[in-house]
Image (spheres, rainbow, N blue to C red):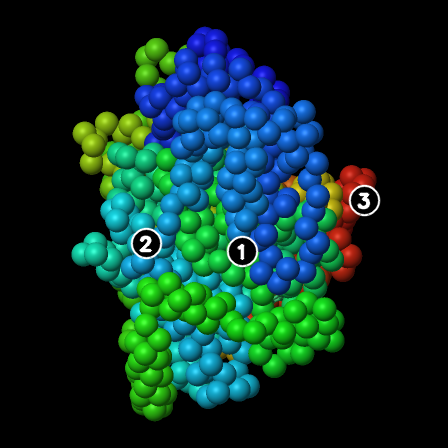
C-alpha cells in the first residue's frame, strides 16, 4: 500500500481504529492473557494521543496531493542525496523524485498544514524544497518509510523534523567539543607513549563520543538506572577512559603488558581492546550506571550476550514483562557495531530476529554503527551487497538514521531521536555514523596499500573533526581558545601522572559470584523431601478446571505422571526434570528454559507449557505450585530457530541471574555447532578471561539410534576437548565446565538441582537423552530423589559376585542399556558394565575404587557407540592410563568422516558388532 493511499484512508475513522487494534492479532503467541515473562501489548503507545488531527490535517493533505507526494519523496528518498560522508568520496546522486517538476508542481504558495511539520502557514514550492533539503539532505539522512506502522512513521516525521529544526544549546555544544578533543588528546598521548600498541583509536570517529554522552545523559534524565553496552575495538579505549571512569593507570598498566586482574586471581585476563568497566555517571544530579560488557574478538558475538544480560536485569527489577512499566525504561541495551562487521556477521540478523519475540524482547536496543567506511582493508562495495551497512535493520522494519560524523551536532540530534523512538515504541533503532579511520586497521598498519584514494582524502584534510568543531565554536563565541588549551594541558598532565603510576598500579578485584570452586571434589545433597516432591509433581500437571486439555496429553502426560508419583516408581525423564525444576521453584528460585520448541519438547516429552485446545491460551502449571506467592517462576522461552544468538542470550542471562536456573536445549545435539563461537569464547572461557561465573545448562540430545550423520551426536568429544581437565592428575571441582552423560532420570534431577545448590557456578554440558526419554529401563523411583541422595559421577554395576568378573567395560550414556540388555540375553555373569555419568571433571577416584573392587578382572575396555574419532574415547584413554593406572582396550565403531552412517542396514550391523566385540569372546 502506498503512503498516499494510506493517508487517504485515514479519513475513514474505522480504518484508523483497525490500525490501532491490539497488536496481539498479528503476533499472539497463543496467549492473550500473557504468561510469566510475556505480557501481550494491547494498546499501541500513542493510541491516546492525537497523532493525526483528522479534520484539518487530512483535508489539506488531500487537497494538495502533489505537494504531499513531493514531501513524502523527501522523507523516503532524501537520504540518497544527503551529505552524510565526511570524506565526500561519492558523487552526489541525482534523485528525480525530489524535483517539484516530477509532480508537475509550479512554484506557487501552498497550505502546509499537516504536510510539513511546524509550517502551518502558506509557503511557496521553492521555500518548501529549501526546507526539505535542509531537513532530509544535509548532514542527516533518515530511512523510515519501511517502518510498518503508520503511527510510528507519523511520529518519526514529527519528531525528526522537530529535533532537526532545533539549535543545539551552547552548553551542550561545549560539552561535545570537550569530549571530542579529549578523545583526540588521549589518542595522541597513547600514540606517543606506546607507538607499537594496537589501540584501534577513535581518530576520525570522535563524534561517536558525544553520541554516547547524549545517550547516558538521556538515560539519567529519564530515570533509567542502568545501560548495558557492548562494542568492538574501535574507539573503545577512548570511551572507557574518557567517559566510563576506567582509570588511566589501569589502561596504561595493561598497555605495558601487565595483568588487569588482581594478584592471586585465577584467570588469564584478556587483551587490551576487551577491557571492561562498570561505573556510575552523574548528570545534573541524576545518576545512571553504565556497564561496558566484555566481548571476544569475534565481532558482533557480544550483541545477543548483551541483550540476555539486559533481560536478566529487567527480570531482577521486575520491569515490563516481569512487572510494571515498559521493557527498557529502566534497563537499556546499547549495541555498538563496526560497518563491516554489522553487514557481514549473521549473528546480527539473528539478534534482530528475536528483538521483538516474547521472552527475548528487551524493549528495543539502541544501535550505533561506527561506520568508518572500511573493514580492515575492505571497502564498502566489497564488504556488502546492500547500499548501507545498516540494511539488516530493514528486516525488522525499524528506522535508521545515517549521519555525517563530521557534524557532531547532527550526531547528537540523531542520538536524541533514537532515544525517543526506542523509549516510545520499545523497538530497536540504528544510528549509522559515517566517519573515517585516521590510520590503518591498527595504528601500525599501512592503509594506502589497498585504499589509496580514501586515504588521500583522509591525509589531505586540513584538520581533524574535533579541531574543526572547536574552531567553529570559537568563531561562534561558545568556546574560548585559551580555556580549551588549558583543558588539554590538564588532561595531558593527568595522563602523564597515570603513566608513571601505572607501574605500581594494582587492579581491584572483579566481583565474582558468591564463592569460587575449590580444589576439592565435592558432593551435594540435592535430595528433596518426598512430600514436597509429590506435591510439586502433582502441581506440575495441575491445570485450571476450565482449561481444555488435549485428550492424549490428559492420558499420556497428566494421568501418567500422577500415577507414577502415586506409585513412587517408574519416574520417567520428563517427570524427573519437572521435579527438579518445580522443587527449585518451590524453594523460591527462578528458572528459565530456552530453545527451539522447548515448551512441548522436541520429542514431545516435556509439556511444561500446555495449550488450551479451544482458545490457544497457554498454561504453565509449574507457575502455580499453590504456595501463596512464595515460589519462583518458570519462564518458558520457545526460541526462534537460532543457536548462536539464542545461546549467547542465555549465557548473558545466566551471568545476570546466577541465582536462577538457566537452561538452553538444542533441538538435536549437533545443532549446537551453529553456536560454536559462543561456546568457545563465552561458555568455556568467560570465567578465566573475565571472572564471570555462569551456571548455564546446555542440554544436547545425543545418541546413536540410526538417525544418520546429523541428529546422532552432540559431539561430546569437542566439549571434552574444550575443558581444562588435566590428563596427568585428578580433576577437582574447579574446572571450566562440567560435561555429563547421565543415564537415569534421577541423575538428571540431581544435576539440575546441583547447579543452584552449590555456592559457585559452572556451565553444565549435558549429553541429553532421546531414546531414554521413554525407555522402560531408564526410570527412577521417588526414593532416588529423597533427602540424602545426590548425583553420582560413576554408576557401578550390581553383579552378585564381583570377584568373578574377568572383564570390566567402562561406558558412558545410553550405550549402557544396549550392553546390559545383551548381557542379560546371553546370561553373561562375568562382565561388569560401569557407567561414567560425569566425564569432566574426570571421576578418577571413583574409577580407581572400582578397579580395585574388580581385582580379578583381566581386561578393561572402553566401549562406545560413537566412532573412534568421536565420543569420549580420546578423553578418557589418557586419564585411565595416567591417573587411574590402567590401559583400556577400545571397543567401538571405527573412525568415520561423519559422526554416523546414513544407511540403517549398516547402522544395525555396526550396532551388532559392538555387542559381539564385548560378549563373543
Ligand atoms: C568474526 C571475526 N572475523 C574476523 C575478524 C578480524 N577482524 C578484526 S577487525 C576486522 C575489521 C572490522 O571492520 P569494521 O567492522 O568495519 O570495524 P572497524 O575496524 O573498521 O572499526 C576484522 C575483519 C574478527 N575480529 N572477527
Ligand atoms: Mg569499519
* Disc 3: which residue: 906
Q: Nearer the viewer, mark 1 or mark 3?
A: 1
Q: Which residue extends farthest front?
A: 108
Residue located at (32% from left, 78% from top): 482
Horizontal side of 559 relative to 379 (left or right) equals left
Quadrant location, ligand no. 1: bottom right
- Disc 2/disc 3 C-alpha distance (Å): 77 Å
- Nearer to the camera, 331 or 847: 331
How crowded pointer 2 is (Cα within 10 Å; few <14, some 14-19, many 20+) is rated as: few
Label 2's element? Answer: loop
* Disc 2: which residue: 169
Query: If you read the primary sequence from the N terminus, does the residue marked by circle 1 or circle 3 appear first?
Result: 1
- Tags 1 and 3 touching, CB below 8 Å: no
Q: Is residue 64 shown above or below 916?
A: above
Camera sees residue 80 = yes
Q: Toward which corner of the image does residue 287 lie, by quadrant?
A: bottom left
Question: x%, y% of residue 552?
Answer: 51, 17
- Nearer to the camera, 174 or 591: 174
Residue located at (18% from left, 29% from top): 628
Q: Nearer the viewer, mark 2 or mark 3?
A: 2
- Nearer to the camera, 717 or 858: 717
How crowded pointer 1 is (Cα within 10 Å; few <14, some 14-19, many 20+) is rated as: many
* Disc 1: which residue: 404
- Tags 1 and 2 touching, CB below 8 Å: no
Query: If you read the primary sequence from the N terminus, does the residue marked by circle 1 or circle 2 appear first?
Result: 2
Query: If you read the primary sequence from the N terminus, does the residue marked by circle 2 or circle 3 appear first?
Result: 2
Residue located at (51% from left, 76% from top): 199
Residue located at (51% from left, 19% from top): 61
Q: Is residue 238 shown above or below 648?
A: below
- Disc 1/disc 3 C-alpha distance (Å): 63 Å
Amino acid at each position: 500500500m502506498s503512503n498516499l493511499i494510506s493517508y487517504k484512508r485515514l479519513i475513514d475513522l474505522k480504518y484508523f481504529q483497525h490500525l490501532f487494534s491490539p497488536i496481539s492479532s498479528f503476533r499472539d503467541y497463543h496467549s492473550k492473557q500473557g504468561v510469566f515473562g510475556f505480557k501481550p501489548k494491547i494498546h499501541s503507545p500513542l493510541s491516546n494521543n492525537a497523532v493525526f488531527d483528522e479534520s484539518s490535517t487530512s483535508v489539506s493533505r488531500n487537497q494538495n496531493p502533489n505537494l504531499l507526494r513531493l514531501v513524502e519523496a523527501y522523507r523516503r528518498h532524501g537520504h540518497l542525496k544527503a551529505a552524510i560522508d565526511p570524506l565526500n568520496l561519492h558523487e552526489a546522486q541525482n534523485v528525480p523524485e525530489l524535483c517539484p517538476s516530477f509532480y508537475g508542481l509550479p512554484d506557487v504558495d501552498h497550505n502546509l498544514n499537516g504536510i510539513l511539520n511546524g509550517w502551518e502557514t502558506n509557503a511557496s514550492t521553492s521555500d518548501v524544497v529549501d526546507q526539505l533539503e535542509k531537513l532530509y539532505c544535509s548532514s542527516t539522512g533518515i530511512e523510515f518509510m519501511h517502518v510498518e506502522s503508520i503511527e510510528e512513521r507519523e511520529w518519526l516525521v514529527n519528531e525528526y523534523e522537530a529535533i532537526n529544526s532545533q539549535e543545539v544549546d551552547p552548553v551542550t555544544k561545549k560539552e561535545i567539543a570537550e569530549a571530542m578533543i579529549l578523545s583526540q588528546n588521549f589518542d595522541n598521548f597513547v600514540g606517543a607513549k606506546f607507538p607499537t600498541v594496537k589501540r584501534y583509536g577513535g581518530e576520525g570517529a570522535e563524534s561517536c563520543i558525544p553520541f554516547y554522552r547524549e545517550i547516558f545523559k538521556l538515560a539519567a534524565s529519564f530515570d533509567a538506572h542502568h545501560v548495558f553496552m557492548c562494542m568492538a575495538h574501535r574507539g573503545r579505549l577512548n570511551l572507557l577512559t574518557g567517559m566510563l571512569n576506567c582509570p588511566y593507570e589501569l589502561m596504561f598498566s595493561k598497555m605495558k603488558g601487565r595483568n588487569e586482574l588482581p594478584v592471586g586471581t585465577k584467570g588469564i585476563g584478556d587483551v587490551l581492546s576487551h577491557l571492561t568497566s562498570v561505573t556510575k555517571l552523574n548528570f545534573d544530579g541524576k545518576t545512571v550506571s553504565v556497564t561496558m560488557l566484555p566481548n571476544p574478538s569475534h565481532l558482533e558475538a557480544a550483541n545477543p550476550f548483551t541483550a540476555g544480560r539486559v533481560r536478566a536485569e529487567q527480570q531482577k527489577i521486575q520491569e515490563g514483562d516481569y512487572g510494571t512499566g515498559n521493557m527498557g525504561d529502566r534497563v537499556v541495551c546499547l549495541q555498538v557495531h563496526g560497518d563491516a562487521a554489522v553487514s557481514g556477521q549473521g549473528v546480527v540478523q539473528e539478534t534482530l530476529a528475536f528483538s521483538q519475540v516474547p521472552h527475548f524482547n528487551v524493549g528495543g536496543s539502541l544501535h550505533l554503527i561506527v561506520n568508518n567506511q572500511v573493514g580492515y582493508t575492505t571497502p564498502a562495495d566489497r564488504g556488502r551487497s546492500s547500499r548501507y551497512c545498516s540494511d539488516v535493520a530493514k528486516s525488522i522494519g525499524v528506522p535508521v538514521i545515517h549521519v555525517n560524523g563530521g557534524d557532531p551536532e547532527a550526531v547528537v540530534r540523531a542520538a536524541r531521536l533514537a532515544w525517543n523512538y526506542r523509549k516510545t515504541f520499545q523497538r530497536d533503532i540504528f544510528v549509522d555514523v559515517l566517519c573515517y579511520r585516521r590510520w590503518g586497521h591498527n595504528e601500525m598498519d599501512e592503509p594506502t596499500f589497498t585504499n589509496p584514494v580514501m586515504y588521500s582524502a583522509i591525509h589531505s584534510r586540513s584538520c581533524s573533526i574535533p579541531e574543526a568543531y572547536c574552531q567553529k565554536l570559537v568563531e561562534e563565541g561558545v568556546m574560548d581558545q585559551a580555556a580549551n588549551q588549558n583543558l588539554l594541558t590538564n588532561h595531558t598532565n593527568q595522563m602523564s601522572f597515570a603513566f608513571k603510576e601505572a607501574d605500581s598500579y594494582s587492579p581491584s578485584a572483579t566481583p565474582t559470584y558468591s564463592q569460587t570452586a575449590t580444589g576439592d571434589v565435592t558432593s551435594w545433597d540435592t535430595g528433596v523431601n518426598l512430600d514436597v516432591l509429590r506435591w510439586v509433581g502433582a502441581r506440575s500437571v495441575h491445570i485450571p478446571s476450565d482449561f481444555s486439555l488435549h485428550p492424549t496429553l490428559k492420558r499420556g502426560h497428566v494421568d501418567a505422571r500422577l500415577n507414577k508419583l502415586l506409585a513412587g516408581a517408574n519416574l520417567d525423564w520428563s517427570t524427573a526434570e519437572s521435579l527438579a525444576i518445580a522443587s527449585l521453584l518451590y524453594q523460591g528460585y527462578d528458572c528459565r528454559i530456552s530453545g527451539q520448541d522447548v515448551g512441548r519438547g522436541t520429542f514431545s516429552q516435556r509439556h511444561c507449557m500446555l495449550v488450551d485446545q479451544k482458545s490457544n491460551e497457554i498454561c504453565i502449571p509449574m507457575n502455580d505450585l499453590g504456595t501463596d506467592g512464595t515460589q519462583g517462576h518458570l519462564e518458558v522461552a520457545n526460541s526462534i530457530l537460532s543457536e548462536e544468538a539464542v545461546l549467547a542470550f542465555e549465557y548473558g542471562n545466566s551471568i545476570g541471574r546466577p541465582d536462577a536456573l538457566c537452561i538452553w536445549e538444542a533441538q538435536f545435539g549437533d545443532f549446537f555447532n551453529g553456536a560454536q563461537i559462543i561456546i568457545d569464547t563465552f561458555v568455556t572461557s568467560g570465567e578465566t578471561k573475565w571472572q564471570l561465573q555462569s551456571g548455564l545448562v546446555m542440554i544436547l540430545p545425543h545418541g546413536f539410534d540410526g538417525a544418520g550423520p546429523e541428529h546422532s551426536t552432540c559431539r561430546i568429544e569437542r566439549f571434552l576437548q574444550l575443558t581444562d581437565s588435566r590428563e596427568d592428575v585428578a580433576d577437582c571441582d574447579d574446572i571450566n565446565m562440567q560435561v555429563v552423560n547421565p543415564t537415569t532420570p534421577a541423575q538428571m534431577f540431581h544435576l539440575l538441582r546441583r547447579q543452584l545448590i552449590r555456592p559457585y557456578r559452572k556451565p553444565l554440558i549435558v549429553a541429553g537423552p532421546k531414546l531414554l526419554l521413554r525407555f522402560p529401563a531408564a526410570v527412577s523411583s521417588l526414593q532416588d530423589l529423597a533427602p540424602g541422595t545426590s548425583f553420582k559421577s560413576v554408576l557401578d554395576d550390581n553383579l552378585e559376585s564381583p570377584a568373578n568378573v574377568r572383564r570390566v567395560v567402562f561406558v558412558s550414556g545410553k550405550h549402557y542399556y544396549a550392553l546390559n540388555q545383551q548381557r542379560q540375553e546371553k546370561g553373561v555373569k562375568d562382565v561388569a558394565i560401569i557407567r561414567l555419568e560425569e566425564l569432566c571433571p574426570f571421576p578418577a577416584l571413583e574409577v580407581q575404587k572400582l578397579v580395585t573392587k574388580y581385582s580379578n578382572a583381566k581386561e578393561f575396555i572402553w566401549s562406545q557407540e560413537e566412532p573412534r574419532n568421536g565420543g569420549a574415547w580420546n578423553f578418557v584413554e589418557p586419564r585411565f592410563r595416567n591417573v587411574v593406572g590402567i590401559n583400556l582396550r577400545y571397543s567401538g565403531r571405527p573412525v568415520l568422516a561423519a559422526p554416523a552412517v546414513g544407511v540403517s542396514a549398516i547402522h544395525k550391523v555396526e550396532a551388532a558388532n559392538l555387542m559381539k566385540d564385548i560378549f563373543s569372546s
